[in-house]
Amino acid sequence: MVESPDVTLELAAREDAPLLANLLELYAHDLSGTFGLDIGADGRFGYKTLPLYWSEPERKFPFFIRSATGVVGFALVTRGSPVTDDPDDFDVAEFFVLRRHRRSEVGRCAAELLWDRFAVRWIVRVSEGNRGGCEFWRRVIPAYSRGRYSHSTRPGATHPWRVFSFDSRNRGASA
Ligand SMILES: CC(C)(COP(=O)(O)OP(=O)(O)OC[C@H]1O[C@@H](n2cnc3c(N)ncnc32)[C@H](O)[C@@H]1OP(=O)(O)O)[C@@H](O)C(=O)NCCC(=O)NCCS
């Protein structure tokens, strides 16, 4: 059994935008094959909506995932999901662990910290073309929700989307 890593979540401040933007480049590169992403003329993938994470602090939450060695990933969360009508559903928009730190339970710990932090209905969307991501959520969500989750499939541009939903209110979380 892998020992649980010492993982924390830290809300990223506006001054941290360049660091988050750099990590988003690594994330986009990782998923560029799945989604057919190309870099722009500046050699970057870019993430146009990143500034909204500080201009809409009630609806968008940017987190760094930290372990003993420093920043090891990030999670971007939005209040309101593109796949549901309830504006108070929380959506895991992006989620990333640096390659060097993968398969050490960093992702699982960070996801659980995230879900415990906000007592809400959560939506997690993953492209079926992202096999590692699918396997990860398929392992972590049933365990966290103790089997009380639903999932469905929606059409996507390159691959179908798998959509999970579950409620973290059942776990005594506080918003
Ligand atoms: C998906 C991702 C976040 C997983 O992070 P991680 O820290 O490696 O995940 P964990 O170590 O907590 O994995 C927990 C379990 O999930 C499953 N899992 C995780 N990654 C997997 C993979 N690539 N293939 C198969 N199963 C995987 C395993 O069951 C794992 O437990 P095990 O290592 O004991 O077998 C990471 O690989 C990543 O950032 N990938 C690129 C970005 C991405 O796909 N993000 C999700 C977008 S929806």
Image (cartoon, rainbow, N blue to C red):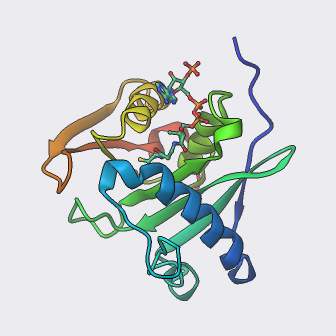
Q: Quadrant of the C terminus?
A: bottom right
Residue closest to the far bottom? 55
| 149, above or below 172, in the image | above
| 140, above or below 91, in the image | above
Residue 66 in picture, x, y percent from top left: 76, 50
Residue closest to the far right? 68
User: Which sits in the foreground, 32 or 51?
Assistant: 32
Horizontal side, residue 52 vs residue 23: left or right: left
For image coordinates 26% across by 65% down, the residue present is 82
Horizontal side, residue 42 vs residue 153: left or right: right
Horizontal side, residue 48 vs residue 27: left or right: left
The part of the image, by quadrant, that contains residue 61 is: bottom right
Tally of numbered tags: 0
Q: Quadrant of the N terminus?
A: top right
Residue 131 in picture, x, y percent from top left: 37, 33
Residue 142 in picture, x, y percent from top left: 41, 27
For image coordinates 86% across by 46% down, the residue present is 69
| 10, above or below 119, in the image | below
For image coordinates 76% across by 20% down, the residue present is 3
Q: Is residue 173 visible?
A: no
The part of the image, by quadrant, that contains residue 21 is: bottom right
Residue closest to the far top? 1
For image coordinates 47% across by 70% down, the residue present is 45
